[in-house]
Amino acid sequence: MTDDMWGEQQMPVTADSLAEESVLGACLMEPSLLDEITLAPGDFSDARNAQVWEALQDLHGEGVRPDATAVAVRLADWGKLGFVGGGPRLHDLAEVVPVAASGPYYASLVAESSRRRAVAAFADSAGAVSRSSLTSTEMVERLRHRLEVIEGSAEAGDGPKPWAQVIERGMEAIDRAASGEEDRGVPTGLIDLDKVVGGFKPGDVTLVAGRPGSGKSVLAAQTAAHVALDLELPVLFMSLEMRIPEIYNRIAASRLGINLGNFTSGVISDNEASKLARQAGMSAASPLWVDDTPSHTLASIGAIARRFKRQHGLRLLVLDYLQLIEPPKAENRQVAVSMLSRGLKLLAAQLEIPIMVAAQLNRGPENRGGKVPTLADLRESGSLEQDASVVILVHREAASDPKSVRQGEADLIVAKNRNGAQATVQVAAQLHYARFASMAGTDRR
């Protein structure tokens, strides 16, 4: 330990810091609140409170009860105990709020203050951009991007949505596309891999990896939809890349055989509109939950998954995709990815559910003849291979060779299968329908 474990440091008291201390105190009193409160360290105005929050989340993610002493030890190990005010202050935090149940209320105040600071920072940046050498068009684009980040944290990031709401928002987006108000974009559902992997088992992490555009997200969304809508088992699909309307478009196109481009353009025929309406009525009660929050940490993913396990009997968690998860603090990116990989494996074991994770491969396949991916191409960390029970590499020959005779085909290479044989499954790549299908056409829809 590199810090004085019980040294104390005076901290300025503000309305924001009181709310933050109330959140920390409530979670020290009742650690289960860490599954309900999904604040990020950056939401805390005081860096010292943010450090305590990070320690709480870190311990909770490991399955350790984060009482004041455990948090003090963790912070001391990090060399941060004196920085946050010392051990006595951690014990005092547990007495800040009379009842732990008020924790979520104070968390809402912290979240609102964080958003207000983000808006203020946006206003400041607008002034700086206006004085830059950018053209007016470039200024607008720069500011639009920053505003979208702020809006995304409050709108796209307001938690999982029930499938009925996904349908509603997805169909609304189609109407907007039809009227030219909005640009749209791409998900699916498959079953052929069960012959090789025997299905995803509780505690297992299945990695679906490929180069950009290979179809890894297609397979992830397709599997989530199949398990929830066909088998009627509770599924949580968390996409850090796509927003709700895109996810709806992909799943609807896949299951109804509607060309994905029709959703993008909003050109939906009467027959297709009837199919969409019929599907909406039949599947609205399906146990599929979708979270399109664009920024997640391993801790926030774990908190949401644990809550859904308690509330809905979660049977499958699908994440798209790994490299977009905010990495934990580490000396380098490789170590950070290793920590993410190990954390997901622990989460699958703790919740006794399978986790399916999409991931990007590095550029290795592009530098080889045939461009067929291997386990060595897993991006940034060999621990991805080590921690996964199953690794499926998605490869489309036609994607790298337009003259290939295998147009419309793909290989799902089961490069690692802890409970079975390795094999290559050939499938039809019906990406215009945002789906893969078995060559025999026997997939259940």
Image (cartoon, rainbow, N blue to C red):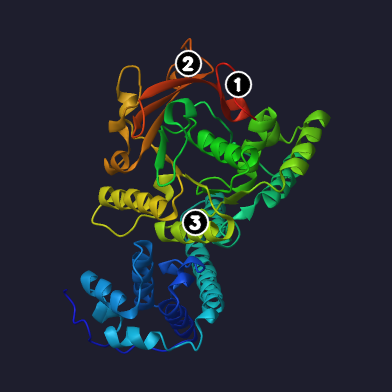
Residue drawn at 39 percent across, 38 percent down: 360
Percent position of residue 294, x then y: 51, 53
Report crowding for label 2: few under 14, some 14 to 19, many 20 or more residues within 10 A (C-alpha): few
On the image, numbered disc 3 is attached to which residue?
A: 305
Number of the label disc, if any, that sits on residue 402: 2
Q: Of tags 2 and 1, which is closer to the observer?
A: 1
C-alpha distance separating marks 2 and 1: 28 Å
Q: Amino acid at mark 1?
A: Thr
The quarter in which the N terminus is drawn is bottom left
Percent position of residue 228, x then y: 61, 43
**Comes first in the chain, label 2 or label 1:** 2
Residue drawn at 49 percent across, 56 percent down: 305
In the picture provided, is 176 more to the left or to the right than 211? right
Residue drawn at 46 percent across, 29 percent down: 214
Which is more toward the observer, 228 or 78? 228
In the picture shown, does residue 167 fall above or below 303? above
The quarter in which the C terminus is drawn is top right
On the image, numbered disc 1 is attached to which residue?
A: 442
Which is more toward the observer, 169 or 184? 169
Percent position of residue 386, x then y: 28, 41
C-alpha distance separating marks 3 and 2: 41 Å
